[in-house]
Image (cartoon, grey):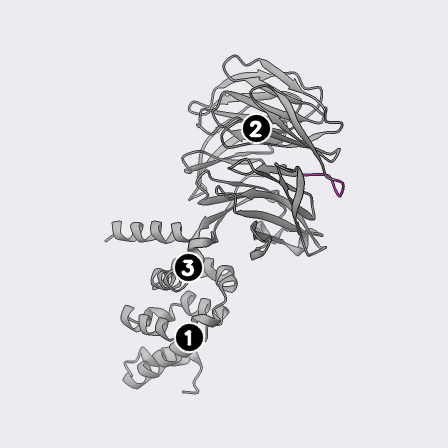
């Protein structure tokens, strides 16, 4: 019983019945301890392969789930996904924490893809959730398979890095820019459709309306412009910002447009009349990003250290979430489709500190969990710049400046997909 674990395993290979019994007992003790580095080790080294599904189920019964650390589980989950008994383990966690998972999305670090260099990391998910499109430093738009990271096709003709891109909700168009002009591409064919010229300085943000009838752009020239996708012409210019426009977001029904600028203002527009409904002023910091809830009742804005929730009935801040770590900046965030949670990517300063993916519950501002973003390609520090969430909220894709793209997948959806995949192989 005091033999080293690997040596004990070797004894079992000689056919020693007693060694096999002791070996399984030792596996059980280590697994039931719930210490995740050890649990990960048991999966990775194949020690759990020595157990039958029934024996493994018995071990699962012995775990004290009242002391189970879900955040620690999430951190180490990627290391056990594809090993023997992993699906049985995940299903047990799903059952034991059924109530928690019914109320909280739970994203797992599923994959990391090493691609070509992308200086500004613009990234978008196609409406069918099968692909992501990424702007590269070589001036091309590249579409990749979202599960494998395999390159599907290349289009675009810029000579400098792509700065920003957007994918229309209906999948008809892709828009991109690297300067003051915007190019619109037919998604199906990759053909160039329009070049939209009108901004005097670089375009920073792009947003299609939910119905796919027009495109909105924000620029360093302080202007918001609305472009017809039917004719490729300018419909209107929306003024009132006094500094560069950094973020745009439509309401899900397309009735409202929100724009934010470095002058600390957030503007809410009526998209039908182009009328400015209200201006919100953030007196703390420049607003870097904005999002409007699916019920059009609040806006979330972000700076590098704060998240704020604005009530659109009173036009006041009703909640402030502070990033309680001065060594990290909030680079990008998304609202989940039900507008109940914020998922944000934080970057350490300096970059060697790495990054984090964090999720907050909007009802009370509580930090639900934080998932470390491991070092990237060749251990070069990642700078995760942009994240995008699929329309159904199942997939989050993040683009970093070190050539990598990370994929996070909803935990429950992963289990369902993995079960279906394994069944298809039987």
Camera-near label (2 vs 1) is 2
- Which is more N-terminal, label 3 or label 1? 1
Q: How crowded is mark 3: few (under 14 residues within 10 Å), some or many (20 or more)?
A: few
Quadrant location of residue 235? top right
Q: Residues within 10 Å of mark 2 (few under 14, many from 20)?
A: many
Q: How far apart are marks 3 and 2 (CA)?
A: 35 Å
Q: How far apart are marks 2 and 1 (CA)?
A: 53 Å
Q: Quadrant of the N terminus?
A: bottom left
Q: Does the magenta stretch include residue 329?
A: no
Instruction: Please tell me which residue is depicted at 33% across the width and 68% down the height of the picture.
Output: 49
Instruction: Please tell me which residue is depicted at 48% across the width and 43% down the height of the picture.
Output: 338
Q: Are marks 1 and 3 in contact (CB under 8 Å)?
A: no
Magenta region, main secondary structure? loop
Task: Write down the residue under mark 3.
Answer: 99
The percent position of residue 99, horizontal first and vertical second, equals: 42, 59
The percent position of residue 306, horizontal first and vertical second, equals: 68, 47
Q: How crowded is mark 1: few (under 14 residues within 10 Å), some or many (20 or more)?
A: some
The percent position of residue 37, horizontal first and vertical second, equals: 50, 69
Q: Distance between the residues labelled 1 and 3?
A: 23 Å
Task: Write down the residue under mark 2.
Answer: 256
Task: Write down the residue under mark 1.
Answer: 32
- Which is more N-terminal, label 2 or label 3? 3
Magenta segment: 283-288
Residue 226 higher or lower than 385, as above or below = above
Relative horizontal placement of residue 407, taking residue 358 as reference (left or right): left
């Amino acid at each position: 019983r005091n033999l080293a674990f690997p040596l004990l395993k070797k004894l079992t290979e000689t056919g020693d019945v007693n060694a096999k019994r002791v070996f399984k007992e030792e596996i059980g003790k280590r697994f039931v301890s719930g210490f995740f580095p050890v649990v990960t080790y048991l999966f990775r080294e194949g020690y759990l392969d020595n157990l039958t599904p029934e024996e493994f189920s018995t071990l699962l019964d012995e775990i004290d789930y009242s002391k189970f650390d879900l955040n620690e589980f999430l951190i180490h989950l990627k290391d056990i996904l594809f090993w023997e008994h992993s699906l049985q383990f995940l299903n047990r966690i799903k059952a034991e924490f059924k109530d928690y998972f019914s109320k909280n999305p739970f994203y797992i670090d599923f994959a990391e893809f090493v691609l070509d260099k992308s200086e500004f990391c613009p990234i978008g998910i196609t409406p069918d959730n099968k692909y992501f499109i990424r702007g590269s430093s070589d001036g091309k738009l590249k579409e990749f398979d979202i599960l494998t990271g395999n390159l599907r096709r290349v289009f675009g003709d810029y000579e400098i890095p792509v700065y920003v891109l957007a994918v229309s909700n209906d999948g008809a168009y892709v828009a991109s820019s690297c300067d003051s002009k915007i190019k619109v591409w037919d998604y199906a064919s990759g053909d160039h459709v329009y070049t939209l010229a009108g901004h005097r300085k670089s375009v920073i943000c792009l947003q299609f309306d939910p119905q796919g009838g027009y495109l909105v752009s924000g620029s360093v020239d302080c202007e918001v412009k609305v472009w017809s996708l039917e004719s490729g012409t300018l419909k209107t210019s929306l003024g009132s910002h006094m500094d560069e426009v950094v973020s745009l977001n439509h309401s899900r029904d397309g009735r409202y447009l929100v724009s934010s600028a470095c002058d600390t203002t957030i503007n809410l527009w009526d998209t039908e009349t182009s009328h400015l409904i209200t201006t919100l002023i953030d007196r703390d910091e420049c607003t870097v990003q904005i999002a409007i809830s699916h019920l059009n009742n609040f806006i979330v804005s972000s700076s590098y250290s704060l998240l704020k929730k604005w009530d659109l009935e009173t036009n006041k801040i009703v909640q402030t979430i502070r990033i309680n770590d001065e060594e990290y900046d909030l680079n990008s965030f998304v609202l989940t489709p039900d507008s109940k949670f914020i998922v944000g990517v934080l970057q350490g300063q300096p970059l060697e500190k790495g990054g984090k993916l964090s999720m907050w519950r909007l009802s009370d501002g509580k930090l639900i969990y934080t998932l470390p973003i491991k070092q990237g390609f060749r251990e070069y520090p990642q700078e995760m710049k942009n994240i995008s969430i699929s329309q159904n909220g199942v997939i989050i894709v993040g683009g970093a400046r070190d050539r990598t793209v990370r994929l996070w997948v909803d935990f429950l959806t992963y289990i369902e997909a993995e079960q279906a995949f394994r069944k298809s192989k039987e």
